[in-house]
Image (tube, rainbow, N blue to C red):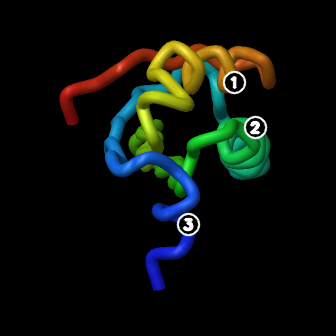
Amino acid sequence: PLEKETVMSKTITKTTLRAKGFSCPPCVGKIEKSVGRLRGVASVKVHFASARIEVEHDADLASVDDLIAAIAKVGYTAQASAF
């Protein structure tokens, strides 16, 4: 059941980001698709109402900067968040 994790290295990190600039539900799909394409990303969940993005990823393959860059690529600003 954990096949996806065995392909990646041993450590999965959960990172929470805060996004700015998205105002429509279709924006959620754009962000999830862009971040989800990164090597090492196991899952992406965008919470539209709170502008929170939760990403489970292998930090050795996809850094927080990589996640933020993928979000910027589709036109939105994000930053690391404690919650």
In this rendering, the label closer to the viewer, 2 or 3: 3
Residue 43: % across, % down: 53, 56
Horizontal side of residue 13 vs 58, given as left or right: left
Is 69 on the left or on the right of 5, as rendered? Answer: right
Separation of marks 2 and 3 at Cα, in angstroms: 19 Å
Circles 2 and 1, Cβ within 8 Å, touching? The answer is yes
Q: Position of residue 51 (x, y in %)?
A: 46, 37
Tag 3: residue type?
Lys
Element carrying mark 1: helix
What's the amino acid at mark 1? Ala
Q: Earlier in the sequence, mark 2 or mark 3?
A: 3
Secondary element type, mark 3: helix
Q: Residue at x 48, y 22 (%)?
A: 63
Residue corresponding to mark 1: 70
Tell me the quadrant of the picture where the C terminus can be found.
top left
The residue to which callout 3 is attached is 4
The answer to which of 61 and 24 lies nearer the viewer is: 61
How many numbered marks are there?
Answer: 3
Tell me which numbered mark, 1 or 3, is placed earlier along the sequence.
Answer: 3
Outermost residue to the bottom: 1
Q: Is residue 80 above or below residue 16?
A: above
Residue drawn 68% across the image and 47% down it: 36
**Residue appearing at x 55%, y 66% in the figure:** 4
Camera-side residue of 5 and 74:
5
Earlier sequence position, callout 2 versus callout 1:
2
Toward the viewer: 77 or 58?
58
Instruction: Name the residue carrying label 2.
Output: 34
> How many angstroms separate mark 2 from mark 1 (CA)?
6 Å
